[in-house]
Image (tube, rainbow, N blue to C red):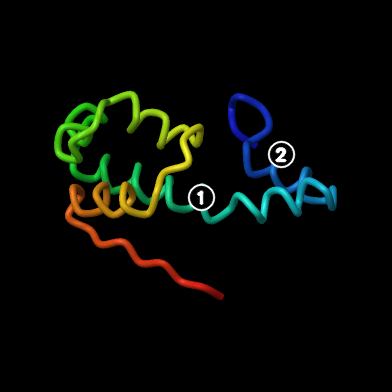
C-alpha cells in the first residue's frame, strides 16, 4: 500500500471484479495503452506538451486532451505524433 492509502492498481483490480466495468475497461484499454506510450516517449525525451505540439503542427491543448484521454484522435494524427517523437505507429488487429 502506498503512503497515500490505496494504490490505483489495487482500486483497478477491485473494480475489474465488476463484469460491466471489466467490459468497458477492455474496450478502452488500447486507447489508454497508446496514451501511456506517447507520454512515456515524450517524457523520455524531456519534451513538454508545447514542444510536442509544435513538432506535430498542432496546439498544446490538443496534446493535453490526447494525453488526458478526452480526445479521440485520427490514425493520421497519431502517426504525426509518433513521427514527432521519432517513433512509428503500428496498428494490429487481433
Give the x, y percent position of residue 50. 21, 27
In the picture, the quarter occupied by the C terminus is bottom right
Left or right: where 23 falls relative to 9: right
Horizontal and vertical percent position of residue 82:
26, 53
List the residue tagged with mark 1. Answer: 31
Which of the two residues, 41 or 54, is positioned nearer the viewer here? 54
Instruction: Give percent across and percent down for residue 56.
Output: 20, 40
Which residue: 15% across, 39% down?
55
Give the SS element for disc 1.
helix
Disc 1 versus disc 2: nearer the observer = 1
| Mark 1 in CB contact with mark 2 (< 8 angstroms) | no
Q: Is residue 54 above or below residue 81?
A: above
In the picture of the structure, the residue carrying the numbered disc 2 is 11
Residue at point 58% right, 53% down? 29
Q: Name the residue at 25% across, 62% down.
A: 88
Quadrant that contains the N terminus: top right
> 45 left or right of 34?
left
Q: Nearer the viewer, residue 69 or 5?
A: 69
Circle number at residue 92: none
Amino acid at each position: 500500500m502506498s503512503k497515500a492509502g490505496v494504490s490505483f492498481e489495487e482500486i483497478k483490480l477491485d473494480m475489474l471484479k465488476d463484469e460491466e466495468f471489466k467490459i468497458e475497461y477492455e474496450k478502452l484499454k488500447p486507447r489508454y495503452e497508446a496514451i501511456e506510450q506517447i507520454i512515456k516517449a515524450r517524457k523520455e525525451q524531456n519534451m513538454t506538451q508545447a514542444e510536442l505540439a509544435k513538432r506535430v503542427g498542432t496546439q498544446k491543448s490538443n496534446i493535453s486532451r490526447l494525453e488526458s484521454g478526452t480526445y479521440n484522435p485520427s490514425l493520421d494524427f497519431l502517426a504525426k505524433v509518433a513521427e514527432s517523437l521519432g517513433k512509428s505507429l503500428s496498428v494490429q488487429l487481433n
